[in-house]
Image (cartoon, rainbow, N blue to C red):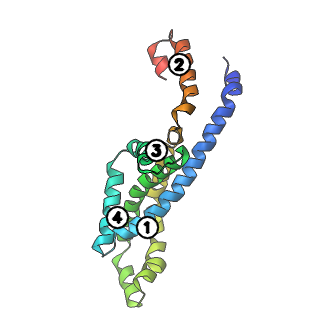
Amino acid sequence: MTYFEFLGEHGPTLLMGATTTVKVLVCSTILYVIISMIFGLMRISKNPIIQGIATVYIEIFRGTSLLVQLFWFYYVLPFFGISLEAFVAGVLSLGMNFGAYGAEIVRGGILAVPKGQWEAAHALNFSPVKRIKRIIIPQIFPIVLPPAANLTVETLSPCPPAPSRAPPKRRRGVHRRAKRRRRRLRGLPVPITTL
């Protein structure tokens, strides 16, 4: 099979997979940015209940594997009456997992703003919300941009398997094709078949 024959046969499938990957990436990135800002701000709160909620969320989602979270969202939530499509489960698990990491980036960015800026905002008699919104948040962008960009690139790597947690009925065709392909590759050396 030549390269062009392969593209002619599998091109639409590859294009559909690339499109799905981009959709998952964009949706999960938007979700993780929102979650990062909310939980990053909650993490620096002086209220112990708000700070505790943020800490529990961050520790749970940073402390468990993304694949485990993906299976929980897709296979375990239906036992509690919440049934999600594969795409939604993938976006939620990616967004919430990377949102926990992003919350720590936001928290670190806020704490990296010089103390004089906080004191100046306090001296101008800004309310705490206005202080954060007008003085602190605009200054954290140059601080958090490099790690946030890195986190967005990291979000791309688990995107392809995320929506593939489809029901077994849809996966049967994939298993049949994989079995046929394994039969064709049986005579090849081991290193070539693992690539």
Q: Is residue 9 left or right of residue 20?
A: right
Q: Which residue is mark 3?
A: 74
> Residue 194: where, in percent of width, then height?
46, 21
Q: Amino acid at mark 4?
A: Ala
Rendering quarter of residue 100: bottom left
Q: Is residue 150 visible?
A: no
Q: Reading the chain from its start, which is encountered first: label 4 or label 3? A: 4
- Mark 3 surroundings within 10 Å by alpha-carbon count, few (fewer than 14), some (14 through 19), many (20 or more): many
Kindly report which numbered mark, 4 or 3, lies closer to the viewer in this rendering: 3
Please report the residue visible at 54 percent of the width from the left and 46 percent of the height from the top: 85
Return the disc, 1 or 3, that comes first in the chain's sequence: 1
Instruction: Give the CA distance from mark 4 to mark 1.
Output: 9 Å
Kindly identify which residue carries mark 1: 38
Q: Nearer the viewer, residue 173 or 154?
A: 173
Q: Which residue is mark 2?
A: 179
Q: Position of residue 102 (x, y in %)?
A: 42, 58
Above or below residue 187? Residue 174 is below
What residue do we see at 43% from left, 77% from top?
A: 132
Q: Is residue 121 in view? A: yes
Measure the C-alpha gap from mark 1 to mark 2. 46 Å
